[in-house]
Image (cartoon, rainbow, N blue to C red):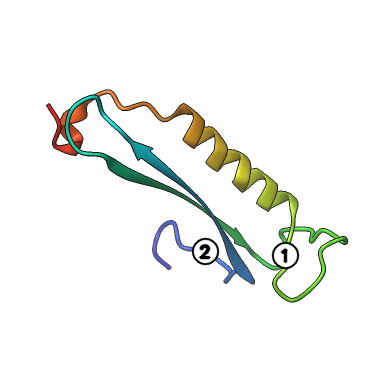
């Protein structure tokens, strides 16, 4: 098995995404997409008993994934406009 690969296949993978519209003072607007993947391996998470329906999965892992996404979005700082073709 290659390094970093999962030892077990997840039941599902929750994706948390954030979209940031970067608007520099000069140049072109740029969209930045932040994605956090949260694999749910059988036996490694506790489903929320209040979740209902086939598409309603909830767990403490999902809460942590959303928190990570929110922290990334809130703390993102562009230190060099040249990365986006702006100077």
Q: Is residue 81 above or below residue 51?
A: above
Label 1: few (<14), some (14–19) or many (≥20) C-alpha neighbours in 10 Å? some
The disc at residue 57 is 1
| Residue at figure coordinates x 37%, y 26% from the top left | 77
Residue 67 at x, y percent in the picture: 62, 39
Query: Which residue bears the numbered disc 2?
Result: 6
Name the element at disc 1: loop
Residue 55 at x, y percent in the picture: 69, 72
| Residue at figure coordinates x 27%, y 23% from the top left | 79
Q: Is residue 68 above or below residue 41?
A: above
Residue 58 at x, y percent in the picture: 74, 59
Q: Residue 59 or 19: which is nearer the viewer?
A: 19
Q: Is residue 49 above or below residue 22?
A: below
| Distance (Cα) linking label 2 and label 1 | 21 Å
Quarter of the image where the C terminus is located? top left
Q: Is residue 79 above or below residue 13?
A: above
2 or 1: mark nearer the eye = 1
Label 2: few (<14), some (14–19) or many (≥20) C-alpha neighbours in 10 Å? few
Residue 82 at x, y percent in the picture: 15, 30
| Residue at figure coordinates x 65%, y 44% from the top left | 64
């Amino acid at each position: 098995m290659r390094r970093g690969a999962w030892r077990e296949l997840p039941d599902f993978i929750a994706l948390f995404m954030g979209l940031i519209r970067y608007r520099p003072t000069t140049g072109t607007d740029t969209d930045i997409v932040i994605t956090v993947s949260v694999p749910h391996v059988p036996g490694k998470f506790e489903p929320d008993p209040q979740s209902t329906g086939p598409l309603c999965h909830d767990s403490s892992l999902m809460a942590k994934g959303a928190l990570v996404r929110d922290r990334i979005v809130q703390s993102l700082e562009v230190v060099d406009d040249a990365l986006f073709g702006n100077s």
